[in-house]
Amino acid sequence: MHRFPVIGGAQRLLRVVPPAGGQPVDVAIRRNKRARRLVLSVDPAAAAAALVIPPFVSIGEAQAFLDSRRGWLFSRLAAVPERIPFLDGTAIPLRGGTVVIRHQPDSRAAAAILDGTLTVGGKPEHLARRVTDWLKAEARREFALNAAAKALTVDRPAPRVAVADPRRQWGSCSARGVVRLSWRLVLAPPPVADYVVAHEVAHLVEMNHGRAFWAIVAGLTPHMATARIWLRRHGQSLLRYG
């Protein structure tokens, strides 16, 4: 019987060897009672692969499926951009421009931008977190103001806006009208973030993706077409940072 390799007593993995040999890759697997087919995906943020398995598929069949898709799998993993950590001297995108992180360990002042430099104080081990916290705060402030203004134009109250770091979507809107957005959109050109905010605010009126919904989005932003193209071409690059 083929058994799951187990790490930490919980993580189930199947191993795949590259077509031409080399370092194998472990693929996290998860059974889903609602799944009707095998679904293999690559998370560019974590540079990791996962496989969803329907209840009627055996582990041996899952392994055979992975082996048959290994060419696709390794090509996708090879295409994942290299991670860029938040370090002193690192250049990062911000609102369509670029800023350079400068660490000032002797400073207790709040993070601030001056002449294209993001200065951050505190201990070195806290630098990455402080940069991330600052970016999240900037994103939350900007997106909340934008969402409130757009909600007003469609005769809806300003939604509560939260920022997070989702892996598979740039934003969402709950049935209760809570808008959640990826903080990484603050790294993108402003028209891109504007489109995503418009998309989620439109869901305050239409909780679907029908014609009426898209008409509302088009009325809330002039950037719909160009922003969608940008996200398709460059969106995954935002996951490199931090």
Image (cartoon, grey):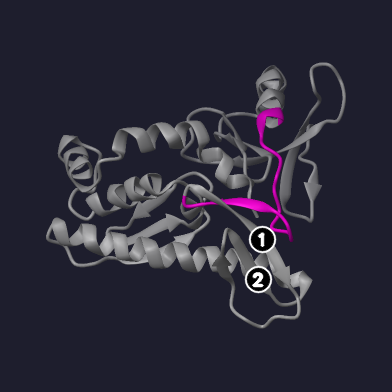
User: Which quadrant is the N terminus positioned in?
Assistant: top right
Query: Crowdedness of circle 1 by 10 Å Cα count: few (<14), some, many (20+)?
Result: many
Q: Is residue 202 left or right of residue 105?
A: left
Query: Crowdedness of circle 2 by 10 Å Cα count: few (<14), some, many (20+)?
Result: many
Q: Is residue 69 above or below residue 194?
A: above
| Mark 2 and mark 1: Cα distance apart in space | 7 Å
User: Sequence order check: which comes first, mark 2 or mark 1?
Assistant: 1
Residue extending farthest front: 115
For residue 120, the mark is: 2
For residue 165, the mark is: none
Residue extending farthest bottom: 108
Asked if residue 166 is among those painted magenta in the image, a careful observer would answer no
Q: Is residue 35 left or right of residue 126?
A: left
The disc labelled 2 sits on which kind of residue?
Val
User: Which quadrant is the C terminus positioned in?
Assistant: bottom right
Instruction: Tell me the residue that label 1 is attached to.
Output: 101
Query: For this rendering, which residue is in front, 27 or 214?
Result: 214
The disc labelled 1 sits on which kind of residue?
Ile
Q: Position of residue 84 (x, y in %)?
A: 69, 48
Residue 176 visible in the picture: no
Q: Secondary structure at mark 1?
A: strand
Residue 19 visible in the picture: yes
Query: For this rendering, which residue is in front, 203 or 119?
Result: 119
Identify the image quadrant of residue 46.
top right
Residue extending farthest right: 22
Residues shaded magenta: 78-95
Q: Position of residue 51 (x, y in %)?
A: 62, 35
Tell me the residue at 40%/51% (across/down).
Answer: 171
Q: Position of residue 94 (x, y in %)?
A: 52, 53
Identify the image quadrant of residue 48.
top right
Q: Secondary structure at mark 2?
A: strand
